[in-house]
Every structure is written in C-alpha cells, then in structure tokens.
Image (cartoon, rainbow, N blue to C red):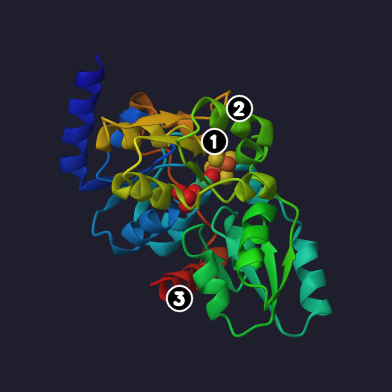
Amino acid sequence: MKEEIKNRIIRLKQEKNAVILTHYYAPAEAQEIADYVGDSFYLAKVAKKSTADIIVFCGVSFMGESAKILNPDKKVLMPDLTADCPMAHMVAKGKIEEMREKYEDLAVVCYINSTAELKCLSDVCVTSSNAIKIVKALPNKNIFFIPDRNLGRYVASQIPEKNIIINDGCCPIHASITKEQLIEQKEKHPAAPILIHPECEPELLEISDVIGSTAELIDYVSQSPHEEFIVCTEDGVDYKLVTDNPEKKFFYPDPRPCCTDMKLNTLENILLALEKENHEVLVNETVAAKAQKSLDRMLELGR
Ligand code: 13P
Ligand code: SF4
C-alpha cells in the first residue's frame, strides 16, 4: 500500500515539476520520499533557489509561509495546512511597537519560527543555526529577540556585549523536557555526550556537550568518534541519525519529545496535496513583501 502511494507521488512529482522539501522532525516516510531534507535554514535556502513549479513543504506553517514568501510566483503546498508551530504566535504585536518606542537603536530579530505578520514587523530573521552569527553582525546595540526566550537567552549568553531583550515565548515540546529527564539518561549512558537544541531551557543547555540546530547535531554525530549519544530534541531526527550511523546508538529523554504538528506530514497527505493542489499556502501580498526583506537579510547575513 505504502509502496503504491510512493510510486504515485513520484509520478505526480515528475508530471507537475514538483519538489518535496522535508524537515527532520517530519515522519520517516516524508523524509524518505523528499528531494531535500534539512533544518530550517537549509530548507529556506533550497526554497529560494528552487526552479520547480510546485514546492510541497513537509513541515509546519511558518516553513510553508517562508517558502511562499521567498517564491511569490510558485505554488507552495503543504500536506496538512493545519500543521502549525504554537511558538510562531507567541509575541504580541503591541510589544514590538512598545520596544521600538523605548529604544532608539533597536533591531527586532525574529526567529524564523514565527508568523508572516511577525516577520513583517521585524528587521531580520534568524534560525537556530545562524542566530549568533547574524546578531553579532548587526550594527545595533539593542536587540529585541522574538518569539523564543530559550534561543534568545542562548544567543544573549554568547554575545554579552549586546543588550538583548527577550520575549517570553517558547516551544512547548522543547521547553517541557526537564533536567531530571536528561540526568536520568546520563546516568544510564554515562559515556554518551548530550546533544541539545537551543529551544530547551538554559539549565539543560548548561549540562549538555553540544548545542545546535537539528542539522548541526546530526553533522556532529557523523563526525564524532563516540558510539552513543543522548539526543535532546524532537525525535524525528532519529530517522536520519540511524540511517547515516547504523552502528551508533541514540537515547532520548523519556517520554520521547514529539511535535504532533510535524507528524501530520504523512505519505497519504503528501499524495492528496499533489493530486488536488488545494492545500495551497497563501500569504497576503503586502505582508509577504515586507516579510521577504527580513528573510532575504537573513540569507545575506547568514551566508
Ligand atoms: P531547526 O532549524 O534546528 O531545524 O529547528 C526548527 C524547529 O522547529 C525546532 O523546533
Ligand atoms: Fe514549533 Fe516546537 Fe514543533 Fe519546532 S518542535 S515546529 S518549535 S512546536
């Protein structure tokens, strides 16, 4: 059954000149069928360069929106339009205006995990793999970092010379992993280094060995002489980790962190999206034009 669905997806992709972009948190089957799999920064770069007529984005809404903003003339589809990232909404627009009034020399730095409306009110976007580099490169002393408090605090800890004001949003999945859950894994597997995503709470980052985006953590494993790893992020990364490193072992906090929105990217939904082309991502043109500036600035500064 799954094989038949895969074959139909492959046929439709060719017929319609479509390309499938998948995030590492999507189900294994969506990673397997994808043309490109990666972290948010990589996928934004791929979307920008794509020559396909249709982009099928297996991720959550801010990723589909970013692909559309970077490609206003292309059709961007999502397997399930309800796949959303709760953190993407976690800042009040009024708060941004308030900060702009308070500080003359302010840059609003927006984690890509945010709605198009928030991007359009910001000066530059960042992802977890380029945030430190981009914030360092900004001429402004005052930074309002939205919406993720944990990535914001991590960036602030690496750039003490800037005044980084942090908004109080978070990823419900990463922020609910506890220090005790991590220590439990370390006690069971003392030789395993702890790899962690910066969306986790600072007290967890403090006891970890490697902090990075999904792609950075995956790259670390491939180059590391270690045989086992404690992986403190959403468990979709397991597919790539195990495929690339069949001889290595991976342990996760218990319960394994799972982003249910990402898991809506099933083969059945990918097929439906390609067949019917009705799960189209649409962004208001005025919002998209402004948001594009923030995304383009990220691509420029993050290069
Ligand atoms: P990455 O950019 O590290 O892939 O992270 C995206 C994300 O949604 C993390 O929760
Ligand atoms: Fe959003 Fe968290 Fe899911 Fe990433 S893991 S998409 S930050 S809810």
Rendered position, 262 above or below 292? above
Residue 224 image offset from top left, x and y in percent: 33, 47
- The amino acid pointed to by label 2 is Glu
Spatial CA span between label 2 and label 3:
39 Å
State left or right for residue 55 relative to residue 202.
Answer: left
Where does the N terminus fall, quadrant-wise?
A: top left
At mark 2, the secondary structure is: helix
Residue 257 image offset from top left, x and y in percent: 55, 31
Residue contact at pointers 2 and 3, CB within 8 angstroms: no
Q: Nearer the viewer, mark 1 or mark 3?
A: 3
Q: Which residue is mark 3?
A: 301
Spatial CA span between label 1 and label 3:
31 Å
Q: Which residue is mark 2?
A: 184
At mark 1, the secondary structure is: loop
Q: Is mark 1 within 8 Å of ligand 2?
A: no
At mark 3, the secondary structure is: helix
Spatial CA span between label 2 and label 1:
35 Å
Q: Residue at x 34, y 57 (%)?
A: 47
- The amino acid pointed to by label 1 is Thr
Q: Residue at x 74, y 59 (%)?
A: 167
Q: Which residue is mark 1?
A: 82
Ligand 2: give its quadrant.
top right
Residue 43 image offset from top left, x and y in percent: 37, 54
The residue at the far top in this view is 1
Disc 2 residue crowd, few under 14, some 14–19, many 20+, Cα 10 Å: some
Q: Residue at x 51, y 36 (%)?
A: 234
State left or right for residue 242 relative to residue 178.
Answer: left
Name the one closer to the observer, 242 or 59: 242
- The amino acid pointed to by label 3 is Leu
Q: Does label 1 or label 3 sit earlier along the sequence?
A: 1
Name the one closer to the observer, 56 or 128: 128
